Amino acid sequence: MPDRQAQPPVTISVEARTQQRDLIDKAAERVGLTRSDFVMGAACREAEDVVLDQTYFPLDARAFAEFMALLEHPPAPDERLYDLMTAQAPWE
């Protein structure tokens, strides 16, 4: 997560039911955080999990061996590879 001092904060608004707000407040108080810090931390952890779930792919032994073989003997660069490597990442 970017350093808070490096960028000015932005506002994110969410609507919650009273029971949800009260639960969040109770949990935030127990860990010594403000409501905003608690919600932001929880939201960022969930966002990181979603992104990592889409970028981490476990491989069985055979698939891993094939992957390693491709790393050791990569295909020759072509236009498609260049386009892929120069494309902006979705999270940027």
Image: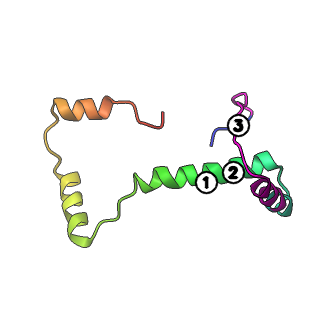
- Residue nearer the viewer, 79 or 72: 79
Element class at badge 2: helix
* Image location of residue 64, percent across then percent down: 25, 65
Q: CA distance from mark 1 to mark 2?
A: 6 Å
- Earlier in the chain: of badge 2 and badge 3, it is 3
Q: Quadrant of residue 59?
A: bottom left
Element class at badge 1: helix
Element class at badge 3: loop
- Residue nearer the viewer, 63 or 10: 10
Q: Give me the disc on residue 41.
A: 2
Q: Report the colour scheme.
A: rainbow
Label 2 sits on what residue type?
Gly
Q: Give me the disc on residue 78.
A: none
- Reading the image, the residue beneath label 3 is 13
| Circle 2 crowding by C-alpha within 10 Å: few under 14, some 14–19, many from 20 | some
- The stretch of residues the image draws in magenta is 5-26
* Image location of residue 25, percent across then percent down: 83, 56
Left or right of 39, for residue 77: left
Q: Nearer the viewer, mark 2 or mark 3?
A: 3
- Residue at left 84%, top 64%? 30
Please identify the quadrant where the N terminus is shown.
Answer: top right
Left or right of 4, for residue 26: right
- Residue at left 77%, top 47%? 37
Label 1 sits on what residue type?
Arg
| Contact (Cβ within 8 Å) of mark 1 with mark 3 | no
- Reading the image, the residue beneath label 1 is 45
Left or right of 76, for residue 56: right
Total marks placed = 3
Q: CA distance from mark 2 to mark 3?
A: 15 Å
